[in-house]
Image (tube, helix red, strand yellow):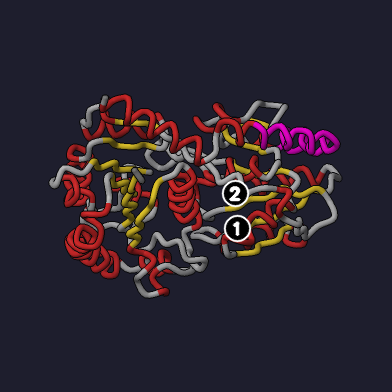
């Protein structure tokens, strides 16, 4: 019998369209769906962001909203209304055609409850304590108390709650009083078929050694530290260059800082690109950068998809010593682990990476081998299915 999955994503700005501003969520959605399909499941997707007006999901949509509190409030009210409407609509369209629903949680949304009350297993995935992150980090939430109540209710009512990190699990258990027994930790992964260095021709912008970054340009990415460290390295007479792929709230400030540090001729700010172009650009890096710093709440619960994408493309990484890098990166063999926010150590690590130039290809090949064997989306989803099956037997 064919196993049938309903994939639900109700966030208006999360879209699989190539123009979507939120590249990380897009990769996550596609990765999970493709993994289920590869494992023999028939997937019926219900992705709200694929059907809203295009300007809701494209470049600048979040920045435009966060600058105006009235827009944020209107967005809150819109999401509340859409949550009720889309839940009923999803049930009407696929309720009789699925055996299981997997939902990517969004603020004010819980589409899976319409399926769950009819006896269909509801797996809810959360990538953050959204009532905290949306208000403190992104400033895209006004009705935080209501958002928190609805978030807690969804976490309690779902059959399983998937968290992207152990740190996120602990935050949810501590702050929201959710039972740890229903939580499954499933870090992010990568589509190793799509991110395959043998399938993409490298696109480089500099002849010299290049450190690259892919993703949303936000405060917690530690990109200002990267500029400062590279400035110090270049002052030592070492030819280091930077390629930034993506956009975000701090891009303008980073460009200004690059000019102030006399780095502008050694930095390439590419901006947002279609997903299809990302592997080609990563292939043009010598080393990938994933140097996150703690979030405003003082903790780091994210699972950086970029870390897995760099390594899948056979690129060593410079990564902060958070949960994912500690699990995935072998320091000195597949990359370099640094203390988060430590400028001096970052400077020393960039020098070490440059001095290891002739070993980087070998380090990258080992990195890809580890990702293929342990951290693909297919491996993640297969483990999830096994856990659910075992627990229900």
The quadrant the N terminus occupies is top left
In the rendered picture of this protein, how many numbered marks are placed on residues?
Answer: 2
Residue span colored magenta: 347-369
Asked if residue 368 is among those painted magenta in the image, a careful observer would answer yes
The Cα atoms of the two marked residues, 2 and 1, are separated by: 8 Å
Label ID, residue 105 = none
- Nearer-the-camera pick, 215 or 203: 203
Q: Which residue is rendered at x = 75% and y = 33% of the image? A: 363
Residue 264 appears left or right of 7: right
User: For residue 326, what is the image quadrant?
Assistant: top right
User: For residue 325, what is the image quadrant?
Assistant: top right
Please give the residue where the numbered disc 1 appears in the rendered image: 254
Question: CB of mark 2 within 8 Å of CB of mark 1?
Answer: yes
The location of residue 105, given as percent across then percent down, is 31, 49
The location of residue 338, given as percent across then percent down, is 62, 31
SS assignment for the magenta stretch, majority: helix
- Nearer-the-camera pick, 224 or 43: 43
Please give the residue where the numbered disc 2 appears in the rendered image: 223
Q: Which residue is rendered at x = 18% and y = 64% of the image? A: 85
Q: Which residue is rendered at x = 62% and y = 30% of the image? A: 329
Which element is circle 2 on? helix
Which element is circle 1 on? helix
Asked if residue 62 is among those painted magenta in the image, a careful observer would answer no
Q: Residues within 10 Å of mark 1 (few under 14, many from 20)?
A: some
Residue 67 appears left or right of 371: left
- Res. 300 visible in picture: no
Q: Which residue is rendered at x = 27% and y = 66% of the image? A: 75
């Amino acid at each position: 019998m064919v196993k049938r999955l309903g994939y639900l994503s109700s966030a208006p700005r999360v879209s699989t369209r190539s123009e979507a501003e939120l590249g990380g969520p897009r990769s996550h959605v596609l990765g999970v769906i493709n993994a289920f399909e590869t494992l023999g499941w028939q997937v019926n997707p219900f992705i709200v962001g694929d059907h809203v007006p295009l300007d809701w999901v494209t470049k600048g949509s979040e920045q435009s909203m966060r600058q105006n509190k009235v827009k944020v409030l209107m967005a809150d009210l819109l999401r509340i209304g859409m949550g009720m409407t889309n839940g009923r609509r999803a049930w009407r369209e696929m309720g009789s055609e699925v055996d299981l629903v997997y939902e990517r949680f969004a603020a004010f949304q819980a589409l899976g409850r319409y399926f769950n009350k009819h006896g269909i297993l509801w797996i809810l995935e959360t990538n953050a304590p959204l009532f905290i992150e949306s208000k403190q980090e992104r400033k895209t939430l006004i009705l935080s108390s209501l958002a928190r109540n609805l978030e807690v209710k969804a976490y309690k009512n779902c059959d399983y709650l998937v968290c992207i990190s152990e740190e996120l699990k602990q935050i949810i258990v501590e702050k929201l009083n959710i039972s740890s027994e229903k939580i499954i930790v499933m870090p992010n992964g990568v589509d190793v078929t799509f991110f395959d260095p043998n399938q993409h021709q490298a696109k480089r912008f500099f002849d010299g050694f290049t450190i690259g970054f892919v993703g949303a340009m936000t405060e917690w990415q530690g990109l200002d530290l990267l500029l400062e460290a590279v400035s110090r390295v270049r002052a030592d007479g070492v030819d280091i260059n930077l390629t930034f792929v993506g956009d975000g709230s701090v891009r303008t400030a980073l460009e200004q800082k690059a000019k102030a540090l006399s780095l502008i001729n050694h930095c390439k700010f590419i901006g947002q690109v279609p997903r299809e172009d990302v592997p080609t650009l990563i292939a043009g890096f010598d080393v990938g950068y994933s140097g996150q710093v703690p979030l405003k709440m003082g903790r780091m619960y994210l699972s950086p998809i970029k870390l897995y994408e760099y390594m899948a493309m056979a690129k060593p990484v410079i990564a902060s010593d958070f949960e994912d890098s500690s699990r995935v990166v072998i320091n000195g063999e597949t990359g370099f682990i640094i203390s988060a926010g430590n400028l001096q150590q970052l400077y020393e690590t960039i020098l070490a990476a440059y001095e290891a130039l002739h070993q980087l290809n070998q380090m990258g090949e080992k990195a890809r081998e580890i990702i293929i064997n342990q951290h693909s989306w297919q491996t993640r989803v297969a483990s999830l299915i096994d856990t659910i099956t075992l627990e229900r037997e």
